[in-house]
Amino acid sequence: MKTKVKLLMTIGLVGTMLSCKSSFNATETMQVAENRNAIYQEIIANPFQLTNFISEAQKSEEAKKTLMKAHMEQMESGNMKMMMEKNPEMKEKMQSHMQMMMEKNPEMMQKMQSKMLAKMMESEKGRKMLMDEIHNNEMMKMEMKAKMMQMMEKNPEMMEEMMQKMMEKNPEMMKKMKGKMKKEK
């Protein structure tokens, strides 16, 4: 009888140990908001884990796009600007990192430039800044002139309209242009 009791106790103990085996399922864990927030806080609180997490995210194209989108939203919201004003070292690092990323990815550079241009064109102050920059930068001035000439060659009505507007706003320019035309003849 002692043998039977020992055998039953051993089977019960082994059965209990096997049934207590922990099985972790990340998907199930992340579905519970409390668990998800606890995991996020744990990663954020530990710089090593945060670095590892970002490193893992950089390996996934989809994750990189998501991170970039979130970064752009932060930049546009103004939160990033406030953070960078408080921490000039961070501002320098971010600017150099953005520059490096844009050099590696011309498509991203094009998108950033078009977004910046669109944002500048929204306000009178932005348009004035852009025009000042174009006037002060010889390379930009030459590019702009070339594009304008190309556009005017394609659309003579636009050229005529622009010439009329310029002459109405600036009579001196009209005199100069008439003088140039006389010299060319």
Image: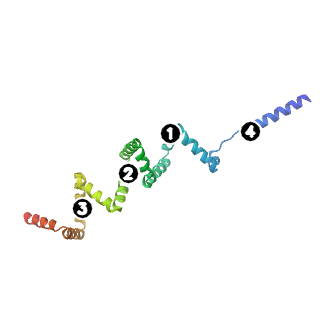
Dot 3 crowding, Cα within 10 Å, few <14, some 14–19, many 20+: few
Which residue is at 50% across, 44% downward? 57
Q: Name the kind of residue labelled 3 in the image.
A: Met
Kind of residue sitting beneath label 1: Thr
| Crowd around label 1: few <14 · some 14–19 · many ≥20 (10 Å) | few
Q: In this view, does 10 lie to the left or right of 51?
A: right
**Residue on which disc 2 sits:** 107
Q: Earlier in the sequence, mark 3 or mark 2?
A: 2
| Image quadrant occupied by the N terminus | top right
- Give the CA separation, mark 2 to mark 1: 27 Å
Position above or below: 41 against 143: above
Q: In the drawing, does residue 27 fall left or right of residue 2? A: left
SS category of the residue bearing label 4: loop
Q: Residue at x 23, y 65 (%)?
A: 152
Tell which tag, 4 or 1, sits nearer the viewer.
Answer: 1
Q: Which of marks 4 and 1 is nearer the N terminus?
A: 4
Residue corresponding to mark 3: 148
Is label 1 in a helix, a strand or a loop? helix
The residue labelled by disc 1 is 51
